Image (spheres, grey):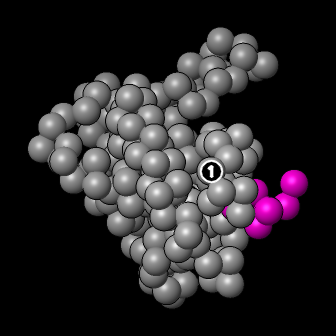
């Protein structure tokens, strides 16, 4: 069914249409929130809050400014940012379960898991604005324009943040390699 038709039906109080409208985007919304917040329950809270806000502010959605999913993801990112700010001083344990590779045997799986853990630890050391662009661009496979629309910034700013984030990640990974090499 057409997105605009679903939106009209939601605004008339049809809850099933709301579910049909957001369902295709929930998985990526949860992934993004989790990658930003590093906690499944906080990510779920962010997505739930985003769904409530989406429902309450659907009348403000302007299809001329971009597709629905871009508007929805920007709400998810903003909710994640709000929760992140509340949690900034708390330590959130990070448990990586995103990459699973059972096709290549246990040794490959363990190597991949360790590499993934190291990369995600480095990503988590970035500040929120750099972490956001990395997650949306690389993990959610969005293009620069989509990232810019979601974050409400210019495309040049996205490119700049991606460049700085990659440079910071590279340095963090080099430092971890050096530290790892000294302890073995």
Answer yes or no: is residue 13 visible.
Answer: yes
Tell me the residue at 69%/23% (across/down): 101
What is the chief secondary structure element of the magenta stretch?
Answer: helix
State which quadrant residue 15 falls in.
Answer: top right
Which quarter of the image is occupied by the N terminus? bottom right
Outermost residue, top direction? 106
Above or below, 131 relative to 35: below
Q: Position of residue 87 (x, y in %)?
A: 20, 43
Q: Taking 179 as reference, is 64 left or right?
A: right
Tell me the residue at 32%/56% (across/down): 81
Residue position marked by numbered label 1 in the rendering:
13
* Region rendered in magenta: 1-7
Q: Taking 96 as reference, is 64 left or right?
A: right
Classed neighbour count for the residue bearing mark 1: other residues with Cα under 10 Å, few (<14), some (14–19), many (≥20):
few
Which quarter of the image is occupied by the C terminus? top left
Answer yes or no: is residue 170 visible.
Answer: no
Name the one closer to the observer, 183 or 148.
148
Q: Position of residue 122 (x, y in %)?
A: 37, 47
Outermost residue, front direction? 12
Q: Position of residue 110 (x, y in %)?
A: 56, 19
Q: Position of residue 160 (x, y in %)?
A: 45, 81
Tell me the residue at 54%/42% (across/down): 31
Name the one closer to the observer, 132 or 160.
132
Tell me the residue at 27%/39% (across/down): 179
Above or below, 164 relative to 15: below
At mark 1, the secondary structure is: loop
Name the one closer to the observer, 110 or 20.
20
Outermost residue, left direction? 89
Q: Is residue 82 magenta?
A: no
Q: How many marks?
A: 1
């Amino acid at each position: 069914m057409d997105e605009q038709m679903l939106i009209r039906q939601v605004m008339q109080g049809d809850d099933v249409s709301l579910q049909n409208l957001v369902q295709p985007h929930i998985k990526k919304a949860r992934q993004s929130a989790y990658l930003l917040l590093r906690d499944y329950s906080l990510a779920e809270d962010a997505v739930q809050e985003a769904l409530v806000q989406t429902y309450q502010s659907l009348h403000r959605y302007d299809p001329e400014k971009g597709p629905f999913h871009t508007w929805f993801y920007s709400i998810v990112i903003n909710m994640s940012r709000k929760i992140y700010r509340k949690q900034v001083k708390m330590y959130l344990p990070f448990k990586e379960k995103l990459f699973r590779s059972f096709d290549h045997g246990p040794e490959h799986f363990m190597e991949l898991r360790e590499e993934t853990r190291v990369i995600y630890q480095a990503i988590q050391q970035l500040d929120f604005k750099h972490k956001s662009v990395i997650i949306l661009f690389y993990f959610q496979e969005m293009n620069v324009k989509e990232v810019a629309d979601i974050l409400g910034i210019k495309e040049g700013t996205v490119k700049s943040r991606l460049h700085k984030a990659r440079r910071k990640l590279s340095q963090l990974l080099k430092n971890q390699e050096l530290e790892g090499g000294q302890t073995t």
